[in-house]
Image (cartoon, coloured by chain):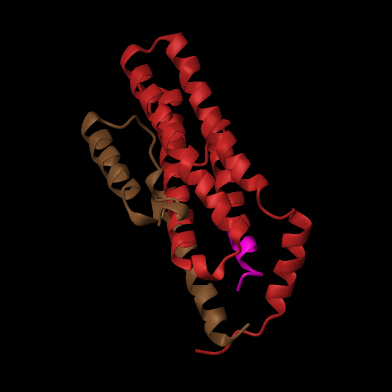
Amino acid sequence: MTPAEILALASASINVFDKAMSALEAAKQNKEMTPEQESEYDSLVEKRMAQAHWKKSTDA
Amino acid sequence: MKKFAPILAAIVLACSLATVATVTTGCNIFGPVEEGHSAVVVNAERTAKLSFYTVDGFLEWEHANRPFLSSDITKAADEVREKFPPAYKALRDSTKLYKFTRDPDDESKLTSSLKIVQGLLNIASGLLPPPERALAETKAAKATTIPTL
């Protein structure tokens, strides 16, 4: 492994860790979502799912 | 790089499985549900968020690093890309329906949707290398010298 590859792996790991922390933060709720929160959340999910990383590799 | 990618993916999926399992089996790591709110609904919404953000992060990482990854990881990611959206939608739809009706039949549909989402994460996890191999490779990774910045 070259130093550049190690750095790339470290960077990728940090990004994945950040995402995991964001997931935990987002799930910190102790009451039901309001209709407004649901609408905002569902809209965010829809936008994310429309991005390139949700397309299958064979479709690229 | 390819050698270590399955380990990272295994860690991400293992963490997500553990977290989703913890949340959905009643071990409440986020504290008690407020009075007047349904624990079933709150847990379903937590699971939806956790599973979505975890899968989204995993797919984004796979997409960004695809040239360096083994084809097995991309194959697993593609399977998740195909199967997760309908399972996730079913979970959200059944949560909304149960919130509206509070009917026991709808609660059982919601529970089934939760199991499908969990099962999907299990399938993805099953495509990864055995834990023994991951553990050995983790030890090898720890021995690698990381250059000083």
Q: Which residues are magenta?
A: B1-9
Chain A pictured colour: brown
Q: Residue at x 57, y 52 (%)?
A: B75
Question: Going by the image, does B146 lie left or right of B95?
Answer: right
- Chain letter corresponding to the colour red: B
The image position of residue A40, as x and y in percent, is 23, 40
Q: Is residue A54 above or below residue B67?
A: above
Q: Please give the name of the residue rendered at 38% of the width and 38% of the height, measured from the top-left corner.
A: A29
Compared with residue B25, is residue B65 higher up or lower down, i.e. above or below?
A: below
Is B142 part of what is drawn in magenta?
no
Within the image, what quadrant is residue B27 found in? top right
Image coordinates of residue B128 in percent, x first then y, are 66, 53
Q: Residue furthest left?
A: A36
Whether residue B33 is visible: no
- Quarter holding the C terminus of chain A is bottom left
Residue A7 coordinates in the image, percent (x, y): 52, 80
- Can residue B130 be seen here? The reply is yes
Q: Is residue B2 magenta?
A: yes
User: Residue drawn 49% across and 55% down?
Assistant: B58
Q: Quadrant of residue B18?
A: top right
Residue B31 image offset from top left, x and y in percent: 47, 38
Quick one: B139 or B117, which is closer to the camera?
A: B117
Residue B24, located in which quarter of the rendered image?
A: top right
Taking A14 as reference, is A22 above or below it? above
Camera-nearest residue between B145 and A52: A52
Query: In the shown orientation, is residue B87 left or right of residue B72?
Result: left
Q: How many marks?
A: 0
Q: Quadrant of the N terminus of chain A?
A: bottom right
**Residue under the image location 60 percent in, 74 percent down:** B1
